[in-house]
Amino acid sequence: MSAALDFAFPLLIVTVALAVAFVLWRLRVAFAKRVARRRTAGYQLMDCLKAYTVWVDWQRDEPLMHAKADALTVPPPLEQAVRIKDAHFPELSPLMLKLLQTHRELMQYLWEQHILRLTHAGLPPHYADPRYHQLRDTQDAALDSLFMRCRQLIGDDGSEWKRTRSDFSFSGDMNLPSRPFNSP
């Protein structure tokens, strides 16, 4: 019996070692897939936020006569960004809330300006208004904070982030970069 046990014991050890190695390999593959899905979602979130900045710039340049007030509540790119955040990045909730608040304030400002322009001719354009610049700077800071934190969460810290604003010719201060809100 001792000879059979001497033969079976190493075989049992090898079998257990192979089983453990297989389980660890499967766990590693599952973890790598989860990380890849999260990274892809992070890039999709950043693409939605970039599309949102383009949408905001378009709203600045276009009169609001073509849109209804409820159609401007949450634009599709921002709505998609919120869905991605909810599904993959719940830790971005405070930063997304700040962006939604700045969006609401900016839309309120644009509607107020639209109403004033309907009743008073000759008002200066949005880009000449300091209040518009303050709202956009606040919004840019919220966007930059979201971009930076999202990049940290997906492990994309390699390159330096440039400021968000796409309407550079109308920005309040070209020499100072947007300062993101403090994020965890």
Image (spheres, rainbow, N blue to C red):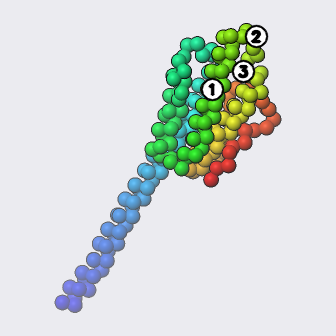
**x 55%, y 13%: residue:** 66
Query: Could you give the CA–CA distance between mark 3 and mark 2, rounded to whole angstroms?
Result: 12 Å
Identify the disc placed on residue 108: 1
User: Quarter-wise, where is residue 166 in the image?
Assistant: top right
**x 22%, y 88%: residue:** 3
Crowd around label 3: few <14 · some 14–19 · many ≥20 (10 Å) = some
In this view, the residue farthest toward the left is 1
153 is higher (above) or lower (below) than 66: below
120 is higher (above) or lower (below) than 43: above
Indicate the amino acid at tag 3.
His
Residue labelled with disc 2: 122
**x 64%, y 31%: residue:** 105
Residue labelled with disc 3: 126
What x and y, as percent, mark residue 129? 76, 23
Indicate the amino acid at tag 2.
Gly
Disc 2 is placed on an element classified as loop
Query: Could you give the CA–CA distance between mark 1 and mark 2, rounded to whole angstroms?
Result: 20 Å
